[in-house]
C-alpha cells in the first residue's frame, strides 16, 4: 500500500492582505456615506412626530383641566398646572399628566400661551431643531393649532 503524506500548505497565507483590508474599509465607508444621511432624516422625522404626540397629550390634559376647573391655566401657571395644583383654583382633580412635564425632543421647554392667538384654546409650540420661531424642514415649528 502506498501511503500518501498529507500535503501541507504554505505557512503565513491564512491572513488578510492589506489590499483586501482596504477594499473592505472602502466598502464600509461608502455604505456609511449612503445610509447615514437617510438615517439622520428618519431621526428628525421621529422627533417631529414625538413633539406632535406630546402636544396632543397636553391638549387632551388641558381639556380635562378645563372641564374640572372651568378655565385654562394662565401664562404664569403654564403647563405646570397640569401636574401641580395652582393657588386659588377650585375643583382641580389632577394631576392631569402621569409624569413631569417633558421638554420637547430637542431638549427645550414647550412654549405655552393662553389666551392663544389661534382660537379659544391655548397655543403650545415646539420651535423645532433650531429653537427659533419659523423655519423649514427640521426647523419647522410644531404647533397645537395645526395637525400636520
Image (tube, rainbow, N blue to C red):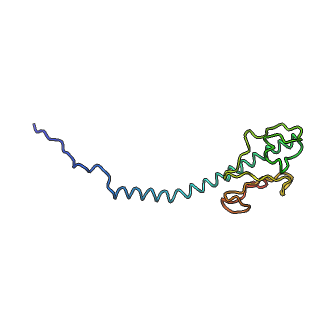
Residue pictured at 74% horizontal, 61% vertical: 133
Q: In which quarter of the image is residue 3?
A: top left
Q: Position of residue 73 (x, y in %)?
A: 84, 47
Q: In which quarter of the image is residue 44?
A: bottom right
Residue pictured at 28% horizontal, 49% vertical: 14
Q: In this view, does 97 lie to the left or right of 48?
A: right
Q: Position of residue 100 (x, y in %)?
A: 73, 42
Q: Position of residue 7 (x, y in %)?
A: 18, 44
Q: Residue furthest bottom?
A: 135
Instruction: Looking at the picture, tell me which residue is in the foreground, 82 or 42.
Output: 82
Residue pictured at 49% horizontal, 57% vertical: 32
Q: Is residue 20 left or right of residue 131?
A: left
- Vertical relation: 125 (above or below) 3: below
Q: Quadrant location of the C terminus?
A: bottom right
- Vertical relation: 131 (above or below) 79: below
Instruction: Looking at the picture, tell me which residue is in the foreground, 39 or 84.
Output: 84
Q: Quadrant of residue 130?
A: bottom right
Q: Position of residue 28 (x, y in %)?
A: 44, 56
Instruction: Looking at the picture, tell me which residue is in the foreground, 133 or 51.
Output: 133
Q: Residue furthest left?
A: 1
Q: Quadrant location of the N terminus?
A: top left
Number of marks present in the image shown? 0
Amino acid at each position: 500500500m502506498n501511503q500518501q503524506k498529507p500535503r501541507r500548505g504554505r505557512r503565513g497565507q491564512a491572513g488578510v492582505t492589506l489590499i483586501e483590508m482596504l477594499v473592505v474599509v472602502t466598502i464600509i465607508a461608502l455604505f456609511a456615506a449612503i445610509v447615514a444621511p437617510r438615517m439622520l432624516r428618519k431621526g428628525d422625522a421621529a422627533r417631529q412626530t414625538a413633539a406632535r404626540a406630546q402636544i396632543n397629550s397636553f391638549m387632551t390634559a388641558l381639556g380635562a383641566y378645563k372641564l374640572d376647573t372651568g378655565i385654562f391655566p394662565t401664562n404664569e401657571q403654564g403647563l405646570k398646572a397640569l401636574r401641580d395644583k395652582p393657588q386659588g383654583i377650585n375643583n382641580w382633580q389632577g394631576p392631569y399628566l402621569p409624569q413631569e412635564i417633558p421638554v420637547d425632543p430637542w431638549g427645550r421647554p414647550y412654549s405655552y400661551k393662553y389666551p392663544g392667538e389661534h382660537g379659544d384654546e391655548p397655543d403650545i409650540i415646539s420651535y423645532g431643531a433650531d429653537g427659533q420661531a419659523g423655519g423649514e424642514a427640521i426647523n419647522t415649528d410644531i404647533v397645537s393649532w395645526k395637525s400636520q
